[in-house]
Image (cartoon, rainbow, N blue to C red):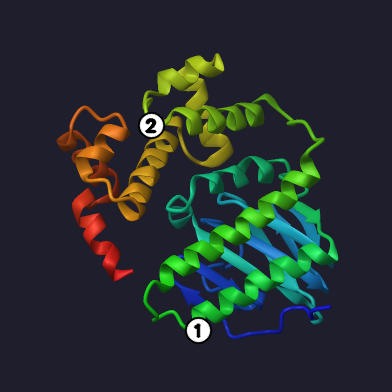
Amino acid sequence: MRSTPQKTRPARRRDINVFSNLNDIPFIHFPAKLDHMIMAVCGEGEVSATIDITQRKLGRHQVMVLRPGHIIDRCEASPEFKGFFVTVSSEHLHEMLPSMQYVIPYSILYNGDPMIEITEEEFESLSLIYDMFTRQLRNHERPFAQMALDSLCELLFYTTLGIYALRTREISYKSRREEILSQFIEVLEQNFRTERSVNYYADRLFVTPKHLSAVLKEMSGQTAGEWIDKRVILEAKLMLRSTGMNIQEISTALNFSNQSFFGKYFKHLTGISPRDYRTNLSDL
């Protein structure tokens, strides 16, 4: 059986961070309103914290995923703690594959108690990914290092999402608001290439556009329009990065009336043109 992760020096690269020591996380000064998604994995010992004014303890073989917006205070790790923390900025999270968004509905189920139990085998799997993270971060100047880190981050969260899904398979949503968020994500994933109107999604969910945006803002920190724009931009970036399609073809695939409109839309939301984004990929 593998040993629990050993304490390492804090390793950081851009918007993805891994830590084995709670005190090494530089951007959390308690009390704090999180602007990162944080995953904490405990192998031994415990971590205690006040989360949204409720005292919590993360114990042996437990995982906790906190999404941006949580208020956290009085966070301490016991002397015998062995585990790790992975943090991803909100902005960078949206740069990653679409299914990363599905972490949000599952984590919402745990707003009251945001921790799940994991098996020894599941802990070993997460620890292996953590080990790969630390090794990759030590070699962050290699070509394509950032893309490798992104892939590891996706692997880690997909694995965690699978664990959450297994634990919640028989759990129904606690409220209509949570149901709206989940249904919106599903409809968005099916239609974002052709539909960018908030009215369209509101009609599909049988709510008003104002109500839809208000619910999404409360539950996820983003309005319906922001969700739609970020999903379209994410797909555009993926196509620019990983396909041989030219910009006109990408524009057509995403249902823009012309390449010029697509270019203005992309630059307005990213600060860079599609052509420059593709050119700058060589710098990763």
Residue 96 placement, left or right of 114 = left
Residue 7 placement, left or right of 208 = right
The image shows residue 44, relative to residue 32, as above or below, that is below
In the rendered image, the residue lying farthest to the front is 244
The percent position of residue 265, horizontal first and vertical second, equals 24, 38
First in sequence: mark 1 vs mark 2:
1
The percent position of residue 88, horizontal first and vertical second, equals 52, 61
User: Is residue 251 visible in this depiction of the protein?
Assistant: yes
The residue located at (51%, 62%) in the rendering is 151
SS class of the residue under badge 1?
helix
Question: Which residue is labeled 1 in the image?
Answer: 138
Residue 267 placement, left or right of 191 = left
The residue located at (33%, 50%) in the rendering is 243
User: Observer-nearest residue: 276 or 25?
Assistant: 276
Q: CA distance from mark 1 to mark 2?
A: 38 Å
SS class of the residue under badge 2?
loop
User: Observer-nearest residue: 199 or 246?
Assistant: 246
The percent position of residue 245, horizontal first and vertical second, equals 27, 46
Q: Quadrant of residue 118?
A: bottom right
| Mark 2 nearby-residue class (10 Å; few <14, some 14–19, many ≥20) | some
Residue 195 placement, left or right of 29 = left
Question: Exactly how many numbered labels are in the figure?
Answer: 2
Q: Quadrant of the N terminus?
A: bottom right
The residue located at (63%, 85%) in the rendering is 8
The percent position of residue 278, horizontal first and vertical second, equals 25, 56
Question: Which residue is labeled 2 in the image?
Answer: 193
The image shows residue 46, relative to residue 177, as above or below, that is below
